[in-house]
Image: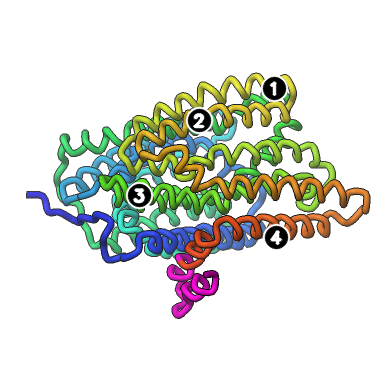
Amino acid sequence: MAQRIDHDNGNGADGRLDTAAVKGAMWLATDQVGSRVIDMLFTVVLARLLVPGDFGLLAMAAASTAFLRLFGNLGLAAAIVQQREVDDELLSTAFWANVATGAALFLIAGVAGKYMGDLLREPRAGVIIIFLSSRFLIAAGSATQVAMFSRHLDFRALSVRSIVATLVAGAVAVVLAVRGMGVWALVAQELTRTAVATVLLYLATGWRPRRVFSPARFRALWSFSGPLLVSRFLRYLMGNTDNLLVGRYLGSTALGFYSMAYSVFTAPLNDFSAIVHRVMFSALSRLHGDGDRFKRGFLLATRYVTMLTIPTMVGLAAVAPLVVRVLFGERWLPAAPVISLLALAAPFGLMMGVGPSGLQAGGRTDLQMWLSLISALVYLPAFAIGLRWGIVGVAACSLVGSAILAPIEFHVNARVTGVRFAELWEAVGASVVGSAVMGLAVVLARRALEPLGLPALVALAALVALGVAVYGALVWAAQRQTLLGMIQIVLEAAPVRGLRAGRLAREAK
């Protein structure tokens, strides 16, 4: 008989699921920021030891294997997180399926390496692709362990081991670079990072796979993960098609402006969205099967997410020209309207809050797949139509597409979460209205400041302060208790003990 590993109905030892979720988000943010800072520091050192061509070779090889990473674990890790109960047989089945997938991807990338080297006219890139492809096989050994930690919202363990792996990998790269290994120092950095993280996670769980593979259990997992893979592919297609079209029909200069604008827009949003999705998918999965608690959890997450993200995106849209001047200089100003339009498109998707997390936690990846297909059928023609008006037209059509998709996305999510529009508006209305008023105030103030000829940095700081003051005052007036509740959860999740927001709630009464 298969041994049951855990059973979690949302009433576990964590006590407060919302506190556990915020604590998990804090650890993921620590991992993301910490790993990036460590990577940046090692990159500075390696840039002094290596030549630009070494970094170029690695970039060529990495780009050639990026697409295959979509299929890295077949989506089985997410399927494990979504399960209410898992046992030894299920975990072992997923483990061996991941290993087989990693081996297949390793062989595919390895065989393709030679041909890619010929295509890129750089044989060394082909050899590097073969070595880098071994990451598929190495990482396959930890996918199940990552899912086990995620089920329990134990993102601290994942984050600590990720940072340790980044440190070790950077040190190895520096040592090899000093010894004159060139690009192979960078290759070793990537492989070491993956290997160390895998070993640490494998040791941390204390779980070892059995020599068992159940076709029936795999089919059950695949019914969840199969549509998820299709959805990931469609999202990947939508995320790259606009760049390809702009580069092909508008030229490299236009693509430079567009890609820079897209990076400014997506950098904060994607980082935040990735953290929210990982945490809320794990948290909502624990409430799957409990309709009322699931809906309340979805609405609460949506309220908190939109309270932070909508004003950020609206504010970015309002001050985009100043942001470009301060960060990149006058010559990049053609990217400013693109930033504004893309930022304004974000709230339409964010109105659904943690929509994909709700669909996955509810076990309806089939609906997520169809929603992704509908999105592709809207966005891809929109990109093509927008080319007529240049990069601003592409961004504007992306905004129109987002507006068209918003009611469709709500309808699909409502089928799983049971949320009515009135309930959704109650959760996000104050944030939407407050952000709109704040955005209008900032735009009017920006136009009033323009004749004064203030330095761009001074004007930007003043407008940001105005935006924070206006939005903060409006939200405090409309949702004081919600804001205090969010502060309380953050303080309870923080490592500093003794800080509690209860007294704030009492003072506000």
For marks 3 and 1, the one nearer the N-term is 3
Residue 285 position within the rendered picture, expressed as x and y whole percent measured from the top left: 32, 48
Q: Are marks 3 and 1 in contact (CB under 8 Å)?
A: no
User: Would you say residue 359 is visible in this rendering?
Assistant: yes
- Whole-angstrom CA distance, mark 3 to mark 1, is 40 Å
In-image side of 361 versus 345 (left or right): left
- Judged from the image, the secondary structure of the residue bearing numbered disc 1 is helix
471 versus 252 height, above or below: below
Image position of 62 with respect to 169: above or below: above
Q: Amino acid at mark 3?
A: Leu
Q: Secondary structure at mark 3?
A: helix
Q: Is residue 500 magenta?
A: yes
Q: Nearer the viewer, mark 3 or mark 1?
A: 3
Q: Which mark is residue 469?
A: 4
Question: Disc 3 designates what residue?
Answer: 284
| x 49%, y 55%: residue | 189
Q: Which residue is mark 1?
A: 387
Which of discs 3 and 4 lies nearer the camera? The answer is 4
Q: Which residue range is magenta in the image?
A: 489-509
The mark that comes first in sequence, 4 or 2, is 2
Separation of disc 3 and disc 2 at Cα? 23 Å
- Among the two numbered marks 3 and 2 on one chain, the one whose residue lies closer to the N terminus: 3
**How many badges with numbers are in the image?**
4
Which kind of residue does numbered mark 4 sit on?
Answer: Ala
Residue at the outermost front position:
509
Mark 3 and mark 4: span between their CA atoms? 33 Å
